[in-house]
Amino acid sequence: MRKTILSTLLALGTGPAMAQTDSTDTGKLSISGYIDSYYLTAFNRPKSGNLLGVDQLAGRAFDRLPDQFALGLVQTKFSYSNRKSDVVVDLTFGPNAEMGNFGNTTGAFNPYRPVAPYSAALYGTSAAIKQAYFTYRATSKLSFTVGQFGTHIGYEVIDAPLNYNYSLSNLFNNGPFYHLGMKAAYSFNDRAALMLGVVNNWDNLTDDNTQKSLIGQFMVKPLPTCTVYLNWIGGYSDDTYLNGLVKAGTLPGEFSNYVRNLYDVTANYQVTSQFYLGLNAAYGRYDFRPGNAAQETLYTDKFGSSQPGWGGVALYSNYAFSDVVGLGVRYEHFEDKHAVRYLQTVNNSITVTAPVTLASGKLLVKPEFRLDTAPVNYYENSDGQGQKSQSTLGVAFIYKY
């Protein structure tokens, strides 16, 4: 369910592909994937026909089209593993693939990438790559991973079959989706592991300013059924969007002089065989470096502070009534009152999902209700005006293989 769990297990070589290698070490190739679609209705009936909010920001980044059947994502994943290594080529197509991989594209999703014909073609093909990396196990405890891989930050992932809820949290929408770089993972024992790496910042196929970000994750298992991940990413002038505004002349050059850090905690606890609890909490901050009072004024006029931050907390719970029917609730509080990320407001949401599992676990049907509230008129009504809440009711259809 959590990207942290998946990335750590694969990096340490404890995933199912490792168990399937044969005694001759010829390795094994596996092909998997899924397709997801959804239908929902929004009771606020937004005039624009989407759920992004009155200013077209990111009230809902992925399942954003009401009153129509909509395609989410189509995935085909190739995995090869032998005794000492793994390789993953994870290809995705569809609207959610474009949204999740916006750092690799030109055009509306990423207006600050090069638009010369050769560059547009390059980024166009790269948009299909969600992940492409290999892992080498130097020892039974130490492994190295190189390539493009999903972020270790956060609780939820892009892949719909791995999340209990279908709609994604604001913590997910406003954090990184993927990284390109290298990381090393070391397993101290079966209860503690450490990962450190260097990457091209956030959601960045190409480094736009030659600055790199550092990443880290510490995993600890206080109980056999409870796992906690402490995650971090930090770097100097590592916001591609903000740097793009500077290069375009929209903001002065002083806005490139900052350090950004994001701290994230995720935890999961299988209380009983039927009852589960999860947690995600995150805090991020830009530390601009004013050299004088005039520069300090620049930052405070734009963001209200020279150290603007964002963050939130999400609580997860679900109960399995049987192998077929379950019920889960997610509550989230998210703050972006300095407008340094996409939401640019404070939001509270509650999501109730009742998944039905059919076809021997291959088909997931997820009825879902979600209510979002904000202290300002953020969400759009049928007249195109703002209102303080948005509620949706829908169902997602996911088939995995």
Image: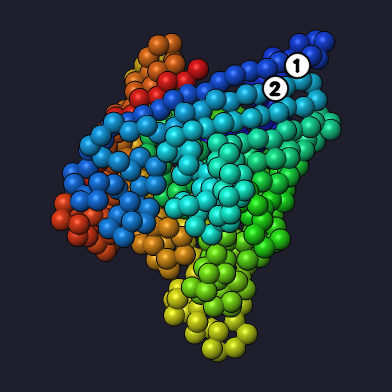
Please name whichever residue, 72 or 191, is drawn nearer the observer in this view of the structure: 72
- Across and down, in percent, residue 175 comes to 51, 51
Is the residue 94 above or below the residue 45 in the image?
above
The residue at which mark 2 appears reads as 80
Tell me the element at label 1.
Answer: loop
- Across and down, in percent, residue 354 comes to 32, 28
Q: Is residue 366 left or right of residue 100?
A: left
Residue that sits furthest to the bottom in the current view = 293
**Residue drawn where x is 26% and y is 64% of the image:** 376
- Across and down, in percent, residue 241 comes to 53, 61
The residue at which mark 1 appears reads as 27
Is the residue 8 above or below the residue 357 in the image?
below
Please name whichever residue, 185 or 148, is drawn nearer the observer in this view of the structure: 148
Residue that sits furthest to the front in the current view = 117
Which three-letter amino acid code belongs to the residue tagged 1?
Gly
Which three-letter amino acid code belongs to the residue tagged 2?
Tyr
**Residue drawn where x is 76% and y is 11% of the image:** 22
Please name whichever residue, 180 or 224, is drawn nearer the observer in this view of the structure: 180
Q: Are marks 1 and 2 in contact (CB under 8 Å)?
A: yes
